[in-house]
Image (tube, grey):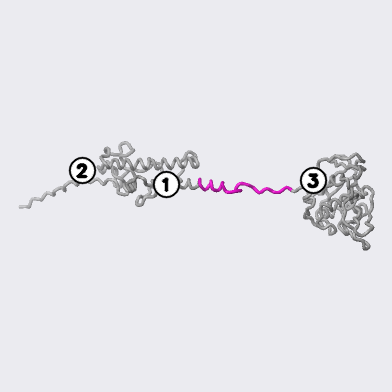
Amino acid sequence: MLPIPRQRQAPAPQPGAGRGGRRGRGPRQDYVDAFDGDGDGDGDVFAPRAGVAAHRSDPYASVTDWPFESDSGTDAENGTEGDVDSAGAPPGDRGRPGAGTGPAKGGKGLAYTGIAAAAVTTVLAVVVAGQVAGGNDNGGVRSQAATDQARDVRGAGTASAQPGASASPQLATLTYAQKMDKKYPLSATLKGPDKFDAVPGVAKAPGKGRKYTYRVDVEQGLGLDGTLFAEAVQKTLNDKRSWAHNGARTFERIYSGKPDFVITLASPGTTAKWCAKSGLDTTEDNVSCDSAATERVLINAYRWAQGSSTYGDEMYAYRQMLINHEVGHRLGYGHVTCDKDGELAPVMQQQTKFLDHDGIHCLANPWPYPGS
């Protein structure tokens, strides 16, 4: 007789087993630890938790985008009440209709509910922080962590608080006297194009004496301030120490029409060309001239920019002397020298070339009537 097969006895149900006799796995301990902490409820929900795997590259993506399948299929397939998948996502019977087989029971359901609620709260907190810090980008939600955004805001505040961070350096504006006393770069051998631009504007004659009209021309390409030159001519000629002395003459700058003469600031090469038209050679000492056969009184731009050894760094006075000397020729005055040692040189002395002659030392002087 064949032996009767022995029936295999089913194991006794384990405490806490779910439907079908299968033992429910319950929430993982790392989730409980994550939200329980040390029991005081003060844990930082933004701090990383050891043992919890990130679901995707964006840890703060929408909860509704998370997968709800368990690691071995859906709850309906497994016959479980609400397992947590291997990636730590919320169970399938939370937040998706028909995903589960029934409501959670007891402490496990409360735990799952707490997990989902905390996750939603975390995402909302990050979204709000992103909107406050920088607004939405085309309606999308910024994925930058709130702590990083806070750090950016603090950094921006610090940068803006730096002294002079947005202030640009202010350039000092030179006065007329400072500009007149300054040297400017210009070559002693410069040859310009022999083309001139008249300085725009007019300057009315301030006196009642005989009026002389003049125009100011500046050769192209010099790189010098034509407006400053024109201002210097007007102020110098109408000074009481100049040819306007005692109201005998007054000078007016015009821009259009025919003037009595044209005061011309020109390169050394162009100055020599125009002076040669009147039989004058300015190349030996690189000087200026009144080209009497033409309408032009030539001021050598090299001398105007660099001065002479006789005046040293006294550029303001030297420029006044240049104007007075050459216009003096236009008015009919010739060259003279001082007669006694230590005497002021007459303005019609060739002071660019020398102050000393025949054992007599003359003092530099820019004015026809210096004592006035």
Which residue bears the numbered disc 2?
20
Local crowd size for mark 2, using a 10 Å CA cut-off: few (<14), some (14–19), many (≥20): few
Location of residue 91 by image quarter:
top left
Nearer to us of marks 3 and 1 is: 3
Residue situated in front as seen by the camera: 332 or 4: 332
Q: Is residue 52 magenta?
A: no
Q: Earlier in the sequence, mark 2 or mark 3?
A: 2
How far apart are the alpha carbons under marks 1 and 2? 38 Å
Q: Percent position (x, y) of residue 223?
A: 77, 51
Q: Is residue 171 magenta?
A: yes
Q: Earlier in the sequence, mark 3 or mark 1?
A: 1
- Seen at 8% across and 50% down, the residue is 4
> Does residue 272 appear in the picture of this structure?
no
The amino acid type found where label 3 is placed reads: Thr
- Seen at 26% across and 44% down, the residue is 78
Vertical arrangement, residue 160 with respect to residue 357, above or below: above
Residue situated in front as seen by the camera: 293 or 364: 364
- Magenta stretch? 153-173
Q: Which mark is residue 74?
A: none
- Seen at 26% across and 47% down, the residue is 25
Q: The residue tagged with tag 1: helix, strand or loop?
A: loop
Which residue bears the numbered disc 1?
58
Q: Earlier in the sequence, mark 1 or mark 2?
A: 2
Which residue bears the numbered disc 3?
227
Q: Percent position (x, y) of residue 323?
A: 87, 50
The amino acid type found where label 2 is placed reads: Gly
**Residue 182 appears left or right of 167:** right
